[in-house]
Image (cartoon, coloured by chain):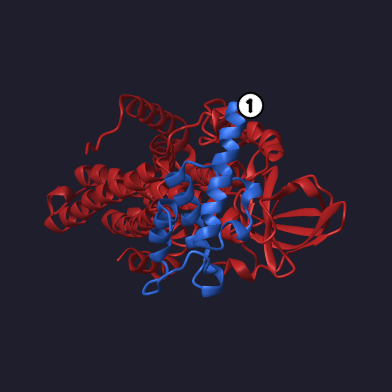
Amino acid sequence: MRLELSAEQRAARAEFRAFAAAEIAPHAGGWDREEAIPREIIGRLRDLGYLGSNVSPDFGGPGRDMITYGLLTEEIAKGCSSVRSLLTVHDMVAHAVQRWGSREQKERYLPSLARGEILGALALSEPNAGSDAKSIETTAADAADAWVLDGRKKWTTFGQIADLFLVFAKVGEQSAAFLVERQTPGVTVRPLRGILGTRASMLAEIELQGCRVPKGNLVGRVGFGISHVAAAALEQGRYSIAWGSVGIAQACLDACRTYAAERRQFGTPLADHQLIRRMLTDMIVDVRAARLLCLRAGWLRESGDPGAFMETMAAKYFASRLATRAAGDAVQLHGANGCSDDYPVGRYLRDAKVMEIIEGSTQIQQITLPQFEFQEF
Amino acid sequence: MDQMQGKIKEFLSRFFKGHDLQPDEDIFALGFVNSLLAMQLVAFVEKEFGVAVADEDLDLDNFRSIGAIAGFVERKTGAAAEAASA
């Protein structure tokens, strides 16, 4: 077993890293304060082919392998978790369509998603339905020539600007997934502001009132909306969040390394203080461990191994908790400066906490991961 | 029980500990079928037997029992072979 990236993967990572360092990281604090990312940066992501990474070349996508996709996510997240959020949700929609969409849906939407001409957003959560996705209250009624959707979605990442929503609804007692274009009559988008972290992710509440969508926009079949379509999207999302968490933790380590070397107290750099070194040691080792879990999940996903589900969840669980821990230590190490907008570590802490909540909370994974363990042994 | 059914049984038995799953036994009626099993089952079928499970295949009857899954795989591989020779 050789644990190393290919030459192509190393070259891709260098490209991602250079882009994020030059065009994302310097602006992330400002975007966080403005609670929005500019159209120009989305255009750059589109031009560089960073949206729709996993879409097959058959549908006009770059067809990046899972490891390269992970490296992209980590590097973008190191610069700005909100920009990473865009990649995450957009790719969740593209992945779900590619996995369970009809031939017509794939031909109609995947090329545009892959080129970033349209942005996708996942509309699953509701005011009364978070971790308990099966309790969604949005309904879809069969009106012979169309599906009629009614309900309210909340916390829809990049809902403010997305062009295509993957909406989950109940058909009677069964779940189903629908592709809903933004301009469909009956769709109302309300921005959500004042979010704790990933603050520039342009969250929105989506109201659907008598929203008629074509029969052909049902993804998969009725009864399989949560168990298969949402599950596929969330699996992709967890993988992205795992790598994004590694990106945050690595950014914390980078910031702390620089600060500890430059900041002097008691006549010596912070880096010479043993308790500071202990914090750095935990970050150094934990970031490596989290990245290895992500790589393992990526290799299994790439080969279509059923074990990828558990390994992806384990990677997300470990990496998101690490990100929160590392960001907490980073703020602590920076002292009063860490509590200031002059340094990015406060933003990292706010962003990291979100990672423990989205795409399966830490507690849901504490319930689920042992199930995998019991099934294996 | 043929080799294919044996592999399916071996995979499913992980989810039904202590139960000797029979070829025509309805796994949905037994309970314990959740989205984790559902997605792993799709991945298992695709990886183990080299078939692609598509949107039109989302039918519980294709996955209801060891025998149903084996029948589904046989239909998919038969259809693929037919398309290749056409």
Asked whether residue A195 appears in the rendered view, the answer is: no
**Letter of the blue chain:** B
Q: Chain of mark 1?
A: B
Residue that extends furthest to the front in the rendered view of this protein: B1
Nearer-the-camera pick, B73 or A18: B73
Nearer-the-camera pick, A245 or A91: A91
Question: Regarding mark 1 in the picture, which secondary structure is present there?
Answer: loop
Image quarter for residue B52? top right
Q: On screen, A329 above or below A297?
A: below
| Residue A230: % across, % down | 58, 56
| Residue A11: % across, % down | 35, 25
Q: On screen, B63 above or below A18?
A: below
Q: Count up the numbered dots.
A: 1
Q: Is residue A229 left or right of residue A270?
A: right
Rendered hue of chain A is: red
Three-letter amino acid code of the residue under disc 1 = Ala
| Residue A218: % across, % down | 72, 51
| Residue A189: % across, % down | 73, 53
Q: Residue at x 48, y 45 (%)?
A: B46
